[in-house]
Amino acid sequence: MLKKKTQQIIKAFGVWMLSLILCLGAAVPAYAAVTENTKGSIRITGAEPNVIVQPYQLMTVNIEEGTPKDPAYSWVEPQMKDWVHANYPQYDDTNEFNNTVSASDLKAFYSKLAADIKNPAKEVSALPAVQSATVDENGVCELTNLPMGNYLLLMSRGFKVYQPTVVNLIPAWDEDEEDWGLAPVEIDGEDLKGEEPSIEKTVNDGKDKDDAAIGDVIPYEIKATIPTYPEGATNKIYNISDTLSEGLTFNPGSLKAFLNDVELTAGDDYVIASGSELGNKTFKLVFNYDKLKARKGGEWEDSDRIRVTYTATLNDKAKVTTGNENEAHLEYSNNPYGDGTNDKEPGTKPKVYTYGIIVNKKTDSETPEFLPGAEFELKKGNDKFYFIKESDGKYRVAKSGDTGATTTLKVGEDGDPKGKLEIRGLDLGTYTLTETKAPGGYNKLREPYTLILRDEVDDSGDNPEPGMDGTLETTQTDKGTANGGNYEVTVLNKKGFELPVTGGRGTIMFTVGGILLIALAGAVLVISRRRNSESEA
């Protein structure tokens, strides 16, 4: 009868498999005969390294002369016994707990217990962890020399958010030996109920790379999964932040947050951090986890995501070649019942690239000297670009709100910039560079230069491929070469109103000689005609 009762107890513990893992020693065949002082072990393999595992004993096993007594279990005194009596008096009798508790009640029971154990204001927090162990680099954790009983495992300090795990280290009847024995409990780390939140960020409709000109408004989207914190968890941090590089200006009015496709309310569903809470981040959204969960009726689905959208403007500090990126972060609690957070970054950081054109003004490609005085205009299709002069011979694309913008690009006048023109802040595409004024004494170019800025995009020129890296391709060997994110071209001018002159003094002598021969031939012709006339007379 007692053997049957114990088996009923084991069966009762096996009811709840929804959110807590229940591991029975009977799963391993190697038994050792038991006494009231028998100790056992729990071995976890394949777990997340560096996770801290703390076993709390909830029940002891009542055994006498190698045979279970009735009741087979007792609440650990005084902490567990007092806590059960104060919160669940109907379960003062462990037999009642094992035989009548439902799966949903069992889940609520262990969730509340886990929260109260970690709450210093609760008396049950005096219940000590039997030991504390850390999962090693191979994913193994050994909990040894444990008294027989029922244990609650609490895990923290990992990338995953773990639910409480229930383990039974209890005797089982060995049919072959016809005796009660205790086997070590083996737990596969994959069976521990834990989830690792993730975050991803894209630019301009799902891309991880894009190109833009200074002044362009760039849309971004952040998507993050939502951890399932245990019922009764006291640390339910869930924050999303972003830090923009100096080449990007955040547009605060564009910031929105969604639960899937439902827009959330600032000040209610989340708070926009400021001051010391914001730190050096561009923005930070502090979400109300309980309100988000209430929007889903108290239960998360695997497909649920928090989405954050906003725009940024590429500004005058944008970098050519290296790209302009920003860093999104997901901050969440990795210890639902105490202190501790983890910070998650996307696998890729979207980059926005911008490009430039460098013009070298010379009289011919062999002459090292550069020509000052030339002026240009730049167009993309029919659109004429406006620029801000940064220094002698250096310009950037003007953005909205800039004053003093001009369409005239003047090459440098003196020193190192002399005869050079640097333009930055352009996106990819085909440009027309037209000389509007030639250097003094030189002819103006008859035709504009057509320059193609290309950085491994597809044939449409719109959708970036993975190869985009901020380095231009040399697509026109007769119009210069790519140099990182700049396209460098040498523009030549010829002097005006000068016909080519060949030869020297010898040429002049030949010319004079020719004129004299023509004159002599004319004189001979005149004399010949006179003689003919006299003869006829």
Image (spheres, rainbow, N blue to C red):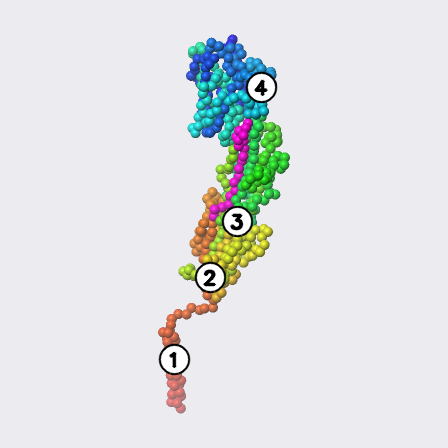
Residue 244 visible (yes or no):
yes
Pointer 1 residue: 516
**Is 259 positioned to the left or the right of 508 in the image?**
right
Whether pointer 1 and pointer 3 mark residues with C-beta atoms closer than 8 Å, the reply is: no
Disc with the residue nearer the chain's start (3 vs 2): 3
Label 1: element kind: helix
C-alpha span from label 3 to label 2: 29 Å
Q: Amino acid at mark 1?
A: Leu
Residue bearing the label numbered 2: 371
Give amino acid for label 4: Trp
Q: CA distance from mark 2 to mark 1?
A: 45 Å
Number of other residues with Cα within 10 Å of mark 4, as a class: few under 14, some 14 to 19, many 20 or more: many
Q: Is residue 229 above or below residue 409?
A: above
* Few, some or many residues within 10 Å of mark 2 (<14, 14–19, 20+): many
Query: From mark 4 to mark 2, how far is it between C-alphas?
Result: 90 Å
The mark lying in front, picked from 2 and 1, is: 2
Question: What is the span of residues highlighted in magenta in the rendered image?
Answer: 321-341
Q: State which quadrant residue 526 falls in.
A: bottom left
N-terminal of the two: label 4 or label 1?
4
Please tell me which residue is depicted at 44% across the width and 28% down the height of the picture: 136
Disc ID at residue 83: 4
Q: CA distance from mark 1 to mark 3?
A: 74 Å
Residue ID for mark 3 = 317
Q: Earlier in the sequence, mark 4 or mark 2?
A: 4
Judged from the image, the secondary structure of the residue bearing numbered disc 4 is helix
State the SS at label 3: loop
Separation (CA) of disc 4 from disc 1: 134 Å
